[in-house]
Image (cartoon, coloured by chain):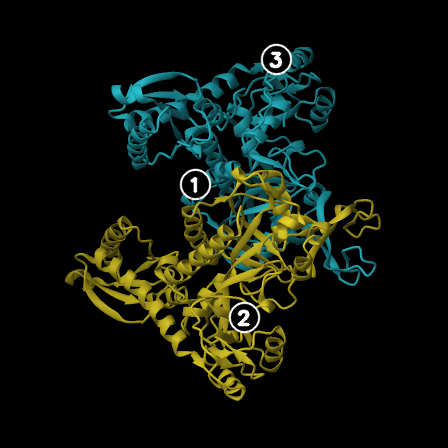
Chain colours: A yellow, B cyan
Amino acid sequence: MENKKVKRSEDYSEWYNNLVKNADLAEHSAVRGCMVIKPYGYAIWEKMQQELDRRFKATGHSNAYFPLFIPKSFLSKEASHVEGFAKECAVVTHYRLKTDEEGKGVIVDPEAKLEEELIVRPTSETIIWNTYKNWIQSYRDLPILLNQWANVVRWEMRTRLFLRTAEFLWQEGHTAHATSQEAIAETKQMLEVYADFAENVMAVPVIKGVKSANERFAGAIDTYCIEGMMQDGKALQMGTSHFLGQNFAKAFDVKFTSKEGKQDFVWATSWGVSTRLMGALIMAHSDDEGLVLPPSLAPIQVVIVPIYKTDEQLEALNAQANEIKSALEKRGISVKYDNRDTHKPGWKFAEYELKGVPVRLAMGPRDLENGTVEVARRDTKEKESLQIQGIDQKIEHLLDNIQQNIYQKALDFRDENITRVDSFEEFEKVLDDKGGFISAHWDGTPETEEKIKELTKATIRCIPLDAKEESGKCILTGAPSNRRVLFARAY
Amino acid sequence: MENKKVKRSEDYSEWYNNLVKNADLAEHSAVRGCMVIKPYGYAIWEKMQQELDRRFKATGHSNAYFPLFIPKSFLSKEASHVEGFAKECAVVTHYRLKTDEEGKGVIVDPEAKLEEELIVRPTSETIIWNTYKNWIQSYRDLPILLNQWANVVRWEMRTRLFLRTAEFLWQEGHTAHATSQEAIAETKQMLEVYADFAENVMAVPVIKGVKSANERFAGAIDTYCIEGMMQDGKALQMGTSHFLGQNFAKAFDVKFTSKEGKQDFVWATSWGVSTRLMGALIMAHSDDEGLVLPPSLAPIQVVIVPIYKTDEQLEALNAQANEIKSALEKRGISVKYDNRDTHKPGWKFAEYELKGVPVRLAMGPRDLENGTVEVARRDTKEKESLQIQGIDQKIEHLLDNIQQNIYQKALDFRDENITRVDSFEEFEKVLDDKGGFISAHWDGTPETEEKIKELTKATIRCIPLDAKEESGKCILTGAPSNRRVLFARAY
């Protein structure tokens, strides 16, 4: 495998592209904008799915599945939704191919034109609320707490693996409630679920906040989000949870009879995270040697590499390694023992560093004599020689320690790179020289946000939920403001 | 819930449709031919997925993900593949909608026409082999053992929930090998995995066999299959495993260098099962009261229903029920305690029968006094009163017993409904009067098979793997045959 060593400090973007390719995570496909998620990348995504799915179920949600296609007319039913999503999408117009009579392979059969075009779902609010209409009559039918794991398509013009692709995988929760309060509580609950997952599983600290009107989901009353900081100081929106009010219920005429016998429109939320999280995971932790994975998402948590010259040595090492392997596996740790004779230890070391395996154990004949093993951790690159006695427990603690350390490192970096500024001059200077998140006053208008974006490419990432009341002046217009918001350039 | 009670014996097809609807498994969507899989149906599908996925991984496969879209030209590259799949498919021709200037909502933007149309994947051999081309250079890159969980679209004209829908969910395995023998061994191994899953998890006995040329997968050298018998005697193909030879490697020019330094085309297999299995599960076991689920696929394995008049009674029952519930859960059994006061016990009994919950426990105040509980099994509808003491172990055994009994019942039915016939007259008579599978001689030609299909609507389901050598004469043409094949009318 050719591993072009571009450093993060030289070209962050190129470093990312190379890493995704060299670590066998994903690649571009023959279809413009669509990716192939390779087995190693998919194994990480599967671990993410399991952790998320468990949390969704623990909070009372069930999975279901709705159609891939959305009739074109559905998109128009919610006015702002169509503005946001109808623009760049894959449109199915025909349902048959036929053999070309002039011998040019197959062509679209003009006779097989659909009466109404179908859109490959960019998100499923419309088809789902059209379905909920038939499921909801009374308050007894509420709440509906569903999630769907699915692929969606948004015809992006400039794509990057995981971060922005025409097709991506995601989950989308769609809930229906009898009251506004209950729907808002659900929206916030799912934001907390996402934050917990990001911080405790992905080891990426996030800021929880509300989007400004410009950045709100098309069709939402409020969009809550978690924002992570990448190592280049740019922001990445890692998940959103939308309070949709009664917008979709009104668009699809979904009413219910309350306990008191009154008719009202149903309240809605939707929330989602996607394979974009793979991009966040890579960019938040990895280094010039390759991936750095938090143990909780590493498909292989521990790799054991034997170092030997003779077959007898290998045999003895095999026995010891397999013993360690099964002791670790009993603790629920995933282990790979790589005793292939086709590759040298040095090659293997580099390979598993590239793949982000959190712990590497190396053992040679002298280790066998001494009852020791060399333990190397991927995050800090520290190595030490440990007694094999009780190694399983030590590794278990080490993995916890690595998980914690990766998080702490990302947290320290993030906190060092949030800067409070009080003038537009300072704002531009910090943005260009230091980057990161900028905490600043804003007058609350979409126009000002738009203007700042035009001038600096920075957007309001969110109004943090924990933002304190504080009198100040908008950095651009000088108009009064009563709290700071977070700006950043973003993925 | 309205539960129209059509009996299996009256109208099998209507019984099936009602059951899918009434048991909350799935429903038709607003998009022609596409279904909504409801939470209860999806929970069963999730259990199927877990069991299959575990088996795929245990046999060395990893999951990956390939694009939803296939460039039109890819379909034409394998001659017989295009014949089989290019006919009825969803064709994406445009990538943008725009607001209609005449105020008619949104319309397809004629400026946004794709240079080459994209097909929503009906199956992924072409896009995957186009990708494998870049992954395979030498024998060291082989085998590739991948699986994908995905949605696919085939524009079926007549659809039925789960059995035949335009969009369905499935898994498709795609493997690449250095030798023909290895690929054939993989094909057969996956057939065994499917048979094991069908019999031991779904409790549906299957016949393993090879398809005749007429029924072969478009692009395969050989299609292996498992065939189940439904309660109306019709066959349902439950899974297929294809030996693709070098067809796709040749179509996409995928060569490798062997150990000996020779260039050769790569050998391929593909294999899949789909949400069609939901249809098989329902039709193989269920009865006029509703679903009958094997415990290994039941989202709820045991339901506990309290029978009470006063709040004090309910309180005492709650305590006892929760104790039983947690004892069962410790054994890995999924339990629902339904003490809702909005529904009467009789309603609950009917509801959980409809939903196919394998075991129902009912308890009233007298049971508490006696330390007993009423245990009802869904499959035989037998009830008995058992001591609560040690109930967890008894239920665990009962669930095993039910799993076994459901399988045995289906097996007995299947075996009773395989008939050997030796003339066409008898063939037609058995097919019309008794149904089921017919074991008969066939001259081995596609023409004869086609003719029999035209005359009787029966097709060759498979040439069983265990078919014995036996001289005979084709029931239609009288031409010599050396083994019997299985005919049936099929879903």
In terms of secondary structure, where does tag 2 sit? loop
B477 vs B394, nearest the viewer: B394
Camera-side mark, 2 or 3: 2
What residue sits right under mark 1 in the picture? B55
Quadrant (top left/top right/bottom left/bottom right) for the N terminus of chain B: top right
Q: CA distance from mark 3 to mark 1?
A: 37 Å
Query: Neighbour class for label 2 at 10 Å: few (<14), some, many (≥20)?
Result: few
Quarter of the image with the C terminus of chain B is top right
List the residue tagged with mark 3: B434
- Determine whether, in the image, residue A275 is placed left or right of residue A125: left
Q: CA distance from mark 2 to mark 3?
A: 65 Å
Side (left or right) of A418 relative to A118: left
Kindly check if marks 1 and 2 are in contact, taking CB atoms under 8 A apart as contact. Answer: no
Work out whether disc 3 and disc 1 sit on a shared chain.
Answer: yes
Residue A374 rendering spot, x and y as whole percentages: 24, 65
Above or below, A456 against B133 in this view is: below
Tell me the element at label 1.
Answer: helix
**Residue drawn at (44%, 21%) of the image:** B379
Q: Which mark is residue A491?
A: 2
Q: Subunit of mark 2?
A: A
Looking at this view, is A216 or A382 the one in front?
A: A216
Which chain letter goes with mark 1? B
Label 1 packing within 10 angstroms: few (<14), some (14-19), many (20+) = some
Can marks 1 and 2 be said to lie on one chain? no
Q: Position of residue A209 (x, y in %)?
A: 48, 66
